[in-house]
Amino acid sequence: MIRLSKKPLEGIRVIDSSYVFAGPYATGLLGDLGAEVIKVEGPTRPDFTRGGAFSGLLPENEPKDDPWNRMSAYNLVNRGKKSLVLDLTRKEGRDVFVDLLKKSDVLVENFTPRVMRGWGLDYPNLKKLNPGIIMVSNTGYGRGGPYSAYPAQATTQEATHGLAAVTGYAGGEPSKAGQSYVDFLAAWTICMAAMIGLRYRRRFGSGLWADIGMYQLGCYNVSEFVMDNIANGAKGERIGNRHRQYAPQGTYRCAGKDAWCALSVRDDDEWRALAGVIGKPELASDSRYATEAARRTNHDAIDALITQWTSNLSKIEAMERLQQAGVPAGAVLDGRDLHFNPQLKERGLIEKVAFPPERDMGPARPLIGRPWNFSKIPLSIKGPAPAYGQHNAEVLRDVLGYDEARIAALRAEKLVVDGKPVKPREFPMMSMDKRVEIGRLAYWEPDYREKLGIL
Amino acid sequence: MLPATLDDLKVLDLSQGLAGPVCAKILADFGADVVKVEPLKGDAARNMAPFFGNAPHPEKSLVYSLANLNKRGVKVNFEDAEGRALIRQMAQKADIIIESYKPGYLASLGLDYESLARDNPRLIMVSITPFGQTGPYKDFKNEEIITYALSGIMSISGLAEREPLKHGGMQSQYEGGLAGAVGTLAAIHARDMLGEGQQVDISLQDVITSTLVIHQPMYGWVGAVQGRRRPSGSNYGQVQECKDGYFIWQTGGGAEWSDIIEFFGSEQLKEERFATVAGRALHGIDLDRIVLDATKDRTMQELFNTASEKYHMLFGIVQEPQDLARCPHLEAREYFQEVDHPVMGRIKVPYRLWSMPDAPAVYRRSAPLLGQHNAEVFGEMLGLDSDRMSALAAKGVI
């Protein structure tokens, strides 16, 4: 196989001053594609993923001396970056930031609109400092429009952008997606906007500004419901795991704890196949089930018949037997299964990222890579997420060309801070068993390192 | 006329359904000349509900009209040697092919990447399929709920005592379109820099698993596995009912607890036990009751506006499709596009994903009717004259 000599974004410098998931994940992925990414955080304002509810867990549930560098979600989205800790609340800190932006190609930020304007770093001003820069702003509602200044985050947005209204058990309340859903739509969109901006600059000579409002992205993903309302006056509905048309469809309980297999029957051939595989071929010609409309009507009875069969099989066995017979089926994988699933394994989605010994993170940890396989560019995560302020000196010296005296002065003034946040984010310590007991976790496996081969 | 970033690129969209077409539509929005190449029976999305007027009709599929805006359309018989020759000729003049066929199908027609790239080494081919081009599941039959199950996301959606819950609609398809466009743009960058095309292989399972950035690493960090939400007895942090719908509120944002007390307007919230996160969780049932009582006569929209504008609270409301269809914010952001469709007439279509004032997404045309641009595309791209096209049409090739 021919390999290209460079990664697509090699030579591109990205400044990531965004927090939490959308911007940091996007810039992490741009890093995987070859960009140099510098993460900028404040001395009193470390990223929210360095503690608290967004941050995941600590290795072996032990904080050690630097919990802010050790959280799981932080380490996933910020892989391969450099870390600069710079006080943007003071003019002298912003001067350094401006120097950095002058030498950069892309800025990804998620400050509220008034912050960047207040600092004179909104796009019209930034463009004067660096006409080639591509500025990607990601906020809840975007600039302009009646909700522009409304505070937002994924949890409240998934209700507002329409997903909750169409998600839920039949007859039940609207349900939350429960994992910062819209942030990931924004992550892909930030990557797109940055790459369209870079191509625009290559072709037409100047940078541009992309104004992303996550709300719009969430709304787009329920478009068929919105269009059905526009065209037909239809209302949204919550139908659980069922399909408007296909029947049966659902998740069926299998042998084992919390074990489920999903299946969907989209035509009479698949129904015949399902009837055969569950050992009741006579159902294929039974008038109660022979047509799609009849199957929708008698869905509950079909569900009971399927469950009789699935409940004696493991979820993987049920899936494999259904697929072999030509019925769309998939085991409900959990967070553990993802690491051992033969399909994800062959695709190489989850990579083991090595940590240097001084980080005391163990030799390696498995992290999600990228959902794109390029035939000529083998990509991998470049390296671990940085420790807080790890690259302060390197960035100031090598990127900005500051001399040692200037760097020392910035440190003395606490405009640049090394090692420890002035105000670390809190992390509620709790034993693993307690986390399971209160329902934050389903279970945990103490021997996971052995299973993963990361001893 | 503003410059369009991708207007030097010709794209053949061989994909069907929603994920591949959305990816190709995004390229079209930013200027690429996208030709949708459909088999004679048309894209499967033409048979997908909902339909305009609720009557199944190949030109009235709302999903098709959404995902194929800004494209021209031709129809070609893939099963016919002359049809395949036409596709090969178009591929020689194309920069990018987007496709979503079962792995191996295009190869069986001699239309796989290796064959097409022999004559056009700059060609990029992007495949967006449920499980990708490799691996033991590559030939698995799929439906949205299957991707959802195998991506891991369903294991954390819904309630612990009930079955795992799929999100509404076709989320993996839309997400596949967005992620697919990222992969496509990366391949365009590589080609701009190094001159060579390549294949990009995208799996929807990989795409959805990629969104589990909180969930996945917990296992590799400490062997932990999240499950679904347990009933706590309290709705705090979940949706709650008001006069005409549901809302959700959170602490944080720009609001102090005292702001939140003032917003709900209840003296009882001043009690010491509600002052901390831990206290609110512990006394969640009482908190719910007080909040429900304080909001039962207030409307969703008023709560949303007041909480957000006056108190800078993190606040959401459960908007139904009809609320989005007439949302003033979406209108102000020019999110919808008025489209004049030859069969459906004038219809408002969700369109603008984000704003980019210097090089915006530009609307040019409604989704193509099946074979609508045969004459135009085959004439201009392949130089076929009308006699030749009539002959091909008579033989059922186009």
Image (tube, rainbow, N blue to C red):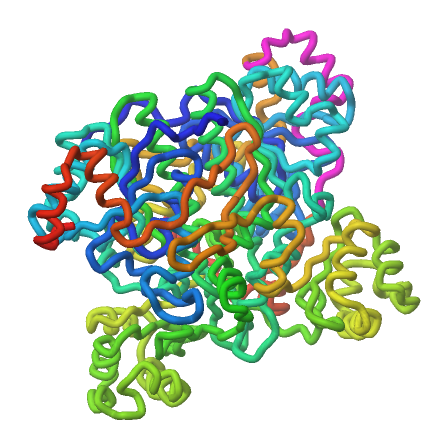
Question: Which residue is found at the position 43% from the left and 37% from the top?
Answer: A354
- Measured as percent of width and height from the top left, residue B164 is found at 47, 71
**Residue in the foreground of this view, choosing between B50 and A161:** B50
| Image side of residue B397 versus residue A104, left or right | left
Is residue B293 found left or right of A70 in the rendered image? right
Q: How far across and how far down the image is residue B147, in percent?
A: 37, 61
Residue pictured at 48% horizontal, 55% vertical: B346
Res. A336 in view? no
B366 up-or-down from A435: above or below: above
x and y, in percent, of residue B286 in the image: 80, 74
Quarter of the image where one finds residue B268: bottom right
**How many tags in the picture?**
0
* Depth check, front residue: A27 or A368: A27
**Could you tell me which residue is drawn at 76 percent across and 68 percent down?**
B282
Q: Residue at x 89, y 67 (%)?
A: B266
**Residue A404 is inside the magenta segment:** yes
Q: Residue furthest front?
A: B387
Horizontal side, residue B214 vs residue A412: left or right: left
Q: Is residue A184 left or right of residue B193?
A: right
Q: Quadrant of residue A16?
A: top right
Q: Is residue B386 magenta?
A: no
| Residue A58 shows up from this direction | yes
Compared to residue B97, the image places residue B325 above or below, namely below
Among all residues in the image, which is located at the extreme right? B267
Tell me the chief SS of the magenta region. Answer: loop
In the image, the segment drawn in magenta is A399-425
